[in-house]
Image (cartoon, rainbow, N blue to C red):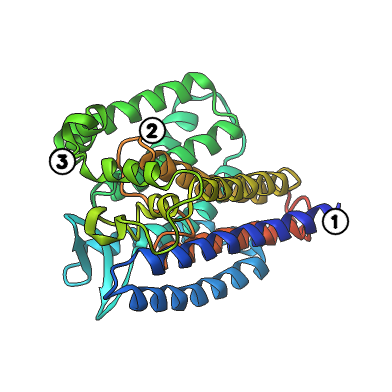
Amino acid sequence: MHSEGSGCRSLLIACSCVLVAYGLLILYSAAQPTTSAHRFAKQCYWLGVACLFFLVFSKINLLQLRAMGKWLGWITIGLLLLVFIPGFGRVVNGSRRWVGIGSVRMQPSELAKIGFVLFLSYWITKNKQVRQNFIEDFVRPLSIVGFFCLLLLLEPDFGTALLFGSVALLALFVRGMPLRFIVPAVGLAIGLFAFLVYLNPVRFSRILSFLDLENTRMGTGYQLWQSLVAFSSGKWFGRGLGLGHQQFFFLPEVHTDFIGAVLAEELGIVHVFVVLGCFAAIAFCGLKITWQQDHPFLFYTGLTSVCFLTLQAFINLGVITGLLPTKGMALPFLSYGGSNLVANFSLVGLLVNLSYRRYPPIEAGGS
């Protein structure tokens, strides 16, 4: 059992390092020549900060964090509210997703993932008995999750709101929420999401361009079209590092949301499969570690951590390959951004923490 945990732990760390290495390599090549060195150095700095967070969350006593569950929920809400503070929140590309002091900026929604994982796991295990009651097992959890998603929608950050909601519904389903509650919840969420997208001209145009990419490739579908061009020109083994065309202003946001397209163009689809394999390995190892947990809080902490890491990755890869509409969601570990790195390494740290299996099955007190 110990060797299995050690093997999963090593593979988790190895895959995370491989993904970060790809990100740094492509970031240096993909960023514009005048800013590449600056972005590369800044990403290396944030990698150091992320490693510190990894060490903290891989060593901390998670059951002590569970005792702070309610406070973690309020802290997470506070993080999401930071962007609305005048003079502190920053508007980028029409969205208020950032906070900053001087030249230092961070994205609270990324860091909020850590708090949300721990708070949701605390709340689920605190209310672990499923009573098949409409109010307790449908309205109440949906209201709690909906409040977090509402704060994200107000930024607006539709993609991250969808991610938070999906992770929470999956955890509630595993907890035992009946399908007769899950299905209406999903239907309600889809309907509300579609209505909000319809009211938002930018998001609605993305949907229309996704449905008719051929006729919108020089307008609202330009970014997705250039991403597909990158994939087709890279073929199996790529054009060569630094020889891709998308780094020369053809593909907007090339260092963040669409860094995977540059990977495909310069290193080839073979390396995209390597990235997919790394995320699949993280999912497999994370779920294996999670399945071995005897304590409910630890089980849901592992489950939601895995979901955040892998679901976001496959959504991003689905976007850049034209399988999903454009959402503005980063590729974990690879995309430029310190908040992204810190959040992802913290979640890996939680999984590594769980892999040691040093916790008792039940806390003193039986909860």
Residue toward you, 300 or 216: 216
Q: How far apart are marks 1 and 3 (CA)?
A: 54 Å
Observer able to see residue 326: yes
Residue plotted at (27% across, 40% down): 225
Q: Which element carries disc 1, helix, strand or loop?
A: helix
- Dot 3 corresponds to which residue? 218
Looking at the rendered image, the disc whose residue lies closer to the viewer, 1 or 2, is 2
Residue behind mark 2: 323
Q: Residues within 10 Å of mark 1 (few under 14, many from 20)?
A: few
Q: Position of residue 188 (x, y in %)?
A: 34, 26
Residue ID at (48%, 49%): 268
The answer to whether 259 appears left or right of 137 in the picture is left
Residue neighbourhood size for the residue with mark 3, other residues' Cα within 10 Å, grouped as few (<14), some (14–19), many (≥20) = few
Residue 214 numbered mark, or none:
none
1 or 2: tag closer to the N-terminus: 1
Considering only vertical position in the picture, is 267 above or below 17? above
Q: Which amino acid does label 3 sit on?
A: Met
Image-quadrant location for residue 82: bottom left
**For the residue labelled by badge 3, is the local secondary structure a helix, a strand or a loop?**
loop
- Mark before the other along the chain sequence, 1 or 3: 1
| Horizontal side of residue 308 vs 302, given as left or right | left
Look at mark 1 in the image and give the residue it sits on.
3
